[in-house]
Amino acid sequence: MEQRHPLPPFTLETALQKVQMAEDAWNSKDPERISLAYTIDTEWRNRTDFINGREAVKQF
């Protein structure tokens, strides 16, 4: 199982770090990097689209 740091339980400092890492991934506009911010079995809903898994995140 993959683990990305920082790991819970979060302090204010590590929570802010985790949020910044997610924002940085999105702002990179790199599908591979964005997908790695989520679990392998992530499930998304975008209006009428249902996106399941990292590969689907990359395609989206």
Image (spheres, rainbow, N blue to C red):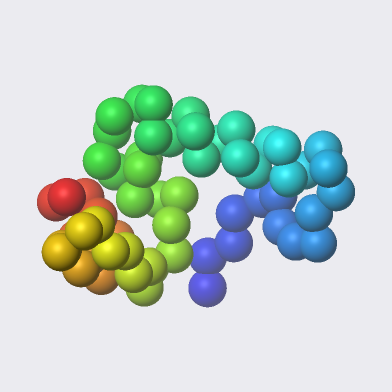
Q: Is residue 5 left or right of residue 60?
A: right
Who's the residue at 34% across and 50% down the image?
Answer: 35
Spot occupied by residue 1 in the image (x, y as percentages of width and height): 52, 73
Name the residue at the front extreme: 47
Instruction: Quadrant for residue 47, please give it.
Output: bottom left
Q: Is residue 60 left or right of residue 25?
A: left
Residue 55 visible, this angle: no
Q: Position of residue 34 (x, y in %)?
A: 36, 43
Residue in the image at 26% along x and 41% along y: 31
Across and down, in percent, residue 8 comes to: 75, 61
Asked if residue 27 shows in the view, the reply is yes
Residue 29 placement (x, y as % from top left): 29, 29
Quadrant in the picture for residue 49: bottom left
Classify residue 46 by image quadrant.
bottom left
Residue at the image position 20 percent from the left and 68 percent from the top: 50
Residue located farthest toward the right when viewing the structure as drawn = 11
Give left or right: position of 45 versus 3: left
Report the residue at 64% width, 43% height from top: 18
Residue closest to the eye, 37 or 51: 51
User: Observer-nearest residue: 30 or 23?
Assistant: 23
